[in-house]
Structure formats: structure tokens, C-alpha cells
Image (cartoon, grey):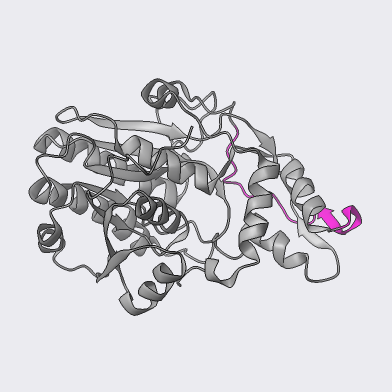
Amino acid sequence: MMLRATDSPYRRARVMVFGASGFIGRWVAQALSAHGAWLYLPVRDPLAARELFHRHGIEAEPMEFDIEHGGSLLELLREVRPSIVFHLAGYGVDHSETGEQPAWRINAAFTGELARAVAGARDLYWPAQVLVHAGSALEYGAIDGDLAEDSEPNPTTTYGRSKLEGTRQIEQYCKETGIAAVTARLFTVYGAGEHAGRLLPSLIEASHTDGVVPLTSGVQQRDFTYVKDVAEGLLRLGLIPAESGSHTVVNLATGRLTPVRQFVETAAGLLGIPSIRLGFGLVPTRFTEMKHNAVNLHRLERLLAWRPETSIEEGIRQTLLYSKHPQMERVQ
């Protein structure tokens, strides 16, 4: 069951979202706007963001702030005194984002700075989590099993290592300051607004061309989670009652593994791409591909009595509906 906007705890709450002009951030901001939250959205380009937010029906006040190059974060938060902050900005999901310095700056250093600033500028009357942070499955890295949240991580990429450091800094500041925060580890999120070059956007683009579509063998398995379900889960996690000094890490996924080949074939069928055009095996599988059992969702279900339920076919259908409308484009 979806959270109901009519009597939502977010109604008239002051909510700040970092990364609101990005893929997942835009969906979260859109959901919060529908719930009647008073939104404050720090962005690098307020003018472009204001146009995007207007197209998506997001009632918000863009605030100029550049995460990579810094600024007075504490001053920014004190201006708003947010009840809750969603930290959905990151560096390294887009395959073009390869720099080590910005990865450590945005994923690790800024995350710690944000946790510290939230502790100094929060709404003391808000009874739930004060910080919701989007973590990553790549924080687990080269381990197997069902990836329970208390597994010992072994990240193998700059993105995974820097995201894990950000998660650890939040935990440290929760203990030191008494704030309550949650880190939601996300897996393979798909939907309208994804970065160009990722799997589903590449297939959508290929549906408008001819020739063979170069693909990996597709035997690797992933937990594909529809972005609207992810946004719903993040909002639900933000409403967990606060315990002083607590930092909860939780997997936010479907708990179902699907071979990449099956995802591709489902999308190709909906897009009208003939199977003969699917060039499985023409691209080598990335060494960073994780191999694990179905993702452990015991903690998610215990906390929320909920899990993402949108099927891959339905999620792709919804994505294709949205992709027909230019207003779904993401601010660069």
C-alpha cells in the first residue's frame, strides 16, 4: 500500500533534498511535493532546476549550492531548519563520472559534513529520522551470500569505497551528536530519467535505430528495482521513529534476482526490437559485477512491513509511457 498524501506526516514539514535534479532525487521530490511538504532543493543551477520542477509539478524553492566546490552548508541548513534531509546526490553512477577526487569529495567528505550540519540545524520537534542517505550495493563489494546489512563489506571500486566511507561518517556523527539517520542501500534502479548509456535508456535509444545492439552475455543477475518504488521506500524510511544516536543501514530492493538477459528480452519485446538484433556476448561483462544470493530484506520488512512490488514488465511499461513525454527529461 502506498503512503497516502492526504494525511501524510510530510504535509507542511520542511524537507530538504540534495540531488533533487537527478534521477532518484527528482522522483523523491515529486513524491514529497504530492504529500504537501515544504520543499527546499539545493541545486547548482536554480534557473534550470526551477523549469524542471515546474514541468514535473514539484512545488519547491531551488537554492543555489554547489556540493563539489563547497559553501556554507551549516548556514544553508540554518536558513531552513529542516525537519528531515534526503541526501540523494552522488558521483559515479553515470559511467562518464570516473574522477577519484570528486567521488571522494561528494560521496564521502560532503556526506560527513552534511550529517554534522544536520545535527546543528535540525528541527528538534520532528519525531522521526532527520537524515535519509542513499547508499549503494557496491558498498558490499566482493562478498557473496544474501548481503545482510551486517555483512563485512569489501568494496572494490572507487564508487563503492567512497560510498561506504560516507555511510561510516554518518554512523560516526549519529553516535557523536544523537541524531537519527538511515542509509538505504540501493541496487539496480531503473526508470524514467536514468542516465544515458545505462541499460534501459540504451535499449530505448536502440529501438529508434537499426542494426545489432551490443550487449554482454546477460547471465549476470541483478535486483532490478523500479525508481518509483525506491522513492516510496525512501519516504517510508524517513518516517521510522527516531532513537537517539541511531544509524540504520537497510537494503532497499525487491529481493528478487533477474538475469540481465531476461530484463533485456522483456524490454525488447515491449519496444518492438526483434530478438535477432540482440547481440548478447558482444560486450565483455564488467569485473565489478556482483555475485550474490537474493538480497536480504528482513530488516526492510521488519521496519516497514513493506517491500517494492512493481514487476519488471510493469516498471518498463511505466518507463516507456514517461519516456514519450519530454517533460520527464533530467536537468544536466
Main secondary structure found in the magenta portion: loop
**Left or right of 150 in this view: 210:** right
Which region shows up in magenta?
A: 274-291
User: Residue drawn 21% across and 42% down?
Assistant: 130
Q: In this view, does 218 lie above or below 128?
A: below
Return the x and y of residue 254 as percentages of the image width and height.
55, 33
Q: Where is residue 120 in the image (x, y as percent from the top left)?
A: 8, 49
Q: In this view, does 106 lie above or below 132?
A: below
Which residue, as the protein is rendered here, is positioned at the far bottom? 47
* 152 is higher (above) or lower (below) than 94: above
The residue nearer to you, when weighing 26 against 32, is 32
Q: Name, please, the residue furthest toward the right.
A: 276
Q: Pick the quarter of the image with the C terminus.
A: bottom left
Q: Nearer the viewer, residue 87 or 104?
A: 87
- Location of residue 271 by image quarter: bottom right
| Nearer to us in this view, 166 or 133 | 133
Query: Which x, y percent locates residue 17?
Result: 30, 56
Q: In this view, does 114 lie to the left or right of 329?
A: left
Q: Can residue 29 be seen in this view?
A: yes
* Quadrant assignment, res 246: top left
On the rendered structure, is 212 left or right of 289? right
Report if residue 49 lies within the magenta region: no
- The residue positioned 53% from the left and 70% from the top of the image is 327
Query: Is residue 155 visible from the viewing direction of this image?
Result: no
Please give the name of the residue rendered at 18% of the width and 51% of the height, measured from the top-left corner. 82
- Residue at image position (12%, 53%) is 81
The image shows residue 247 at horizontal and vertical percentages of 25, 32
Magenta segment includes 277? yes
Residue 316 horizontal side relative to residue 277, left or right? left
